Amino acid sequence: MLIWGNRYIGFFLFGMCMTDSIAERAASQRDESRLSWKVITAYGAPGIGAGYMYLLIGLYIMKFSTDVLLIAPAIMGTIFGISRVWDAISDPLVGYFSDRTKHSLGRRRLWLLLSIVPVAGSFIMVFSPPAGLQGSWLVAWMAVGVIGFYSAATIFIVPHMSLGAELTGNYHERSRLYGLRHAAFTIGSILAVASMYLLIKAEQVSEAAVRQTAFELSAIAALATAILILFAVVRLRERADYQGRVNASPFGAFRDVWGNRHARLVLVVSFIEAIGSSVIGLLTLYVAQYVVGRPELAALIILSYMIPSTLSVPMWVPLSRRFGKIRLWMFSMMLTGLSFGGMFSLPWLEPDMRLIVIFSLAVLAGLAAGCGGTIAPSVQSDIIDYDEYMTGERKEGSYFAAFNFVHKSAIGVMILITGYVLQFSGFVPNQVQTMQVQISMVFLYGLLPLCCYSIGTYLFSRFTLDEATHEKMRHEMDARR
């Protein structure tokens, strides 16, 4: 009995030592996979410039074109629709060739470096049409500027998002990395709102004042973005062992993307979510001016969305650890849909009540956006790991090209639809709008996102790549190596 007792105690102590060893090793692995703040800051910094450019174009370019340049809404909608067709070619090409790149800078940083001049130049072009241009020449200038900007943005966005998936394979650390990127992107968006306020004030002075203000703001933003991208190129490093691990055929690479069942589902959900998120930038100015009747408050309405989106990021990362990324993303979609859906009631409310409703719902939508911006790219990165598990390749560029194309397509679809709806509902710039026009606006602003997000939530409930599955998959891939 004494011998068996000693053996039992020995096995117990051995088991305790093994448990401690496993716990220490797991803690060590967590520490090793934890990204430093220097890396996270360098990665997120260019998001400020990208957020500024994307939102200012999404927020103001339609109004700038219709109210200042006097271009018909349907024409601008067509320009954005054409740019989405071109994206169907440019996004996959950039993603695939980024995956295939072999360079001392790495697969991604070389593309970031090459994006600086076209991104800066095309952004300035969009907001600086020569005063003498009219008619077809003015439309051509804006078409080249808009299509050129989104093409240049692809050269930056796709490799930059791809680089984030390579910096860490940790399930939750990715949320932390992309959360800070989302916060930086939103900070840039807040600066864009401030710029929009300056542009609206300039509209009260003269057309020349708007043009001059637009040129100055775009030039400053272009220079700042160039510096931030260069900072990321200098400070970040890439994994050399990922180079060359991609399908030799671009068709084979994108066949793998579509063949990935998790990717197919998230592509659909991302498209639906992007439709909802693009609405606030596209129609808030119109709703504030023509439905709420307080155009001077448009910037504050957008800030009431942007600020919670930024400040809530530190809250969503620990919540994703507790409740899981899948549940949290579903929650963000439901909250977004309900927040926008409530906007449909605006035309029938009293003026003071309209302000209370739109500000309150904007705050809720901003909280949801902070969650989605933190979790969505983290989930997308997990899907890329699943592709490696199935194919042995690393195709971050091909995957994020697909996700980026879906995002830009949603914006293009909304701009195209909005342009034609405004045109044929009887919209007249700078005039009091009929009830028919107001209902058309809030239908696009409220009911359409509510329907889309409801469908997206239902579809995403079928997503099965959770933390336990991802951890098992990573262990098997480590064993293969």
Image (tube, rainbow, N blue to C red):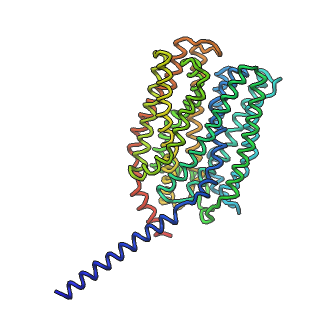
In this rendering, is residue 237 above or below 284?
below
Q: Quadrant of the N terminus?
A: bottom left
User: Does residue 254 show up?
Assistant: no
Q: Residue at x 48, y 45 (%)?
A: 264
Which of the 4 image quarters holds residue 129?
A: top right
Residue plotted at (74% across, 25% down): 210
Residue farthest along the right direction in this orientation: 132
Q: Among all residues in the image, which is located at the extreme left? A: 1
Question: Hey, which quadrant is residue 139 in on the image?
Answer: top right
Specify whether 22 is left or right of 56: left
**In the rendering, at what x and y percent does residue 15 appear?**
31, 76
Residue 349 vertical position relative to residue 364 in the rendered view, above or below: above
**Could you say where residue 322 lies in the image, as x and y percent from the top left?**
39, 52
The residue that appears at 52% across and 12% down in the rendered structure is 435
Q: Is residue 126 left or right of residue 408?
A: right
Q: Position of residue 67 (x, y in %)?
A: 69, 20
Q: Is residue 14 visible?
A: yes
Label count reads 0
Front-most of residues 468 and 356: 356
Q: Nearer the viewer, residue 259 or 271?
A: 271
Q: Nearer the viewer, residue 264 or 69?
A: 69
Image coordinates of residue 160 in percent, x first then y, are: 63, 51
Q: Is residue 63 above or below residue 87?
A: above
